[in-house]
Amino acid sequence: MGNLRIALDPWVLAPRFRHQGTNVYARNLIAQFRKAAAQIPELEFVLFGPAQGFEAELSEPSVNFSFVSNRLVQHERLWRLGGANVSARRIGTDVMFSPSCNVFPLRKPPVVCTIHDATPFVMPSQSRSMVLAQRFFLRSAAQRSRAIITVSERSKEDLVEICNIPPEKITVVYNGYDKTRFNEAPPDLDKLQALRLRLDLQRPYILHHGVVQPRKNLVRLIEAYQLLLSPRSDLELDLVLAGPAGWEHGKVVQTAKRCSSKRGQVVIPGMLADDDLALLVKGAVMVVIPSLYEGFCLPMVEAMACGIPTVVSNNSCFPEISGNALEYFDPQSREDMAQKMESVLFDSELRERIKARGLKRAAEFNWERCGHETLGVLGKAVGRELSMEVFA
């Protein structure tokens, strides 16, 4: 039947998305695709990109993996509204893969896209004009793609209901995580201490890592943190909210200033380097994730993989992805959040139980499996079965 030639949409690889989940996802899949291309003779990939300014590690050609510069990539509307499809058709690819829903699929070649969640419909996190655009692309991608990948059963249910598409069109493929950084290995204490000094962390700390925006529910987390400290005059803890500033982050910053005290401060260090973030996770006494909606929640899996006691919302994908291994709270209730944080903080048996269960569950996620299952969906979309012993 000849080679299966797959075009890769580079949209989420743009520098401005560098620390967002879709960028991390695309980069790791590309690494798996390179590995597969070198070992599966009938497989070939073509990654589009701008003529200049693309990172060397992404544009580096390898066995059955080529980079094609395309000026259309730099023209957002043209690229997203059919330019990607037309470019893929011109170079004779069999199928195009988009690691996000920022694409308007045409008939040829067929498109397989990943829709990570239904955030624009369920919990909008941008301006009205941006949300309208996100809804348009999400619905178009869902309805016009040959096949859809999503990252949790909960996201699949949301997409079926909201976009009115048959469930058999959607395949759930779980994400992986960076096991070289997020693991049980103890942190380098000298580096951790240097990082704590740089961030002015003088006490043990509770951590949240992710974009600072309303959907993350961080104002309630700060207020729950206050409730945790207030009745215990002997308790001193900092709260760290690590991550880039997102839409309407100002209220979080204002609340943090108001709620810092002599027994604990709320620290918002901004975006950190990957190695620093992993250090910060490993040094935390607890990770708390109070988000109102997520499709997969990579920060939760990273904390679990480090053996850090983790307390999360009881909504959306959290119980599914964590395997019901953690402690859960109502994200609308500051009191419930504070009570669960207190339980984990002062109950050593509960902490150890969460740690053990979290480690076991996190071990089930990896990028190799994600790459294998994604290639399976791509092949099936065009009636091809690939011999993928490389992932065995």
Image: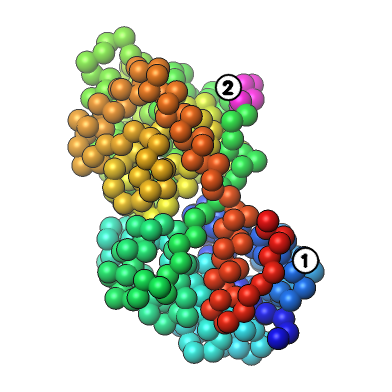
Residue at 25% x, 26% y is 339
* Magenta segment includes 25: no
C-alpha distance separating marks 2 and 1: 42 Å
Q: Which residue is mark 2?
A: 193
Q: Residue at x 38, y 80 (%)?
A: 143
Examine the rendering and report whether any part of residue 134 can be seen: yes
The answer to if 187 sits in the magenta stretch is yes
| Disc 2 versus disc 1: nearer the observer | 1
Does the rendering let one see residue 259?
no
Q: Residue at x 60, y 45 (%)?
A: 178
Disc 2, SS: helix
The amino acid type, in three-letter code, at marker 1 is Ala
**Considering the image in quadrants, where does the C terminus appear?**
bottom right
Report the magenta residues as a range. 186-191
Q: Which amino acid lies under the numbered mark 2 shown in the image of this protein? A: Gln
Question: Tag 1's secondary structure?
Answer: helix
- The residue under label 1 is 38
Residue at the image position 66 percent from the left and 88 percent from the top: 92
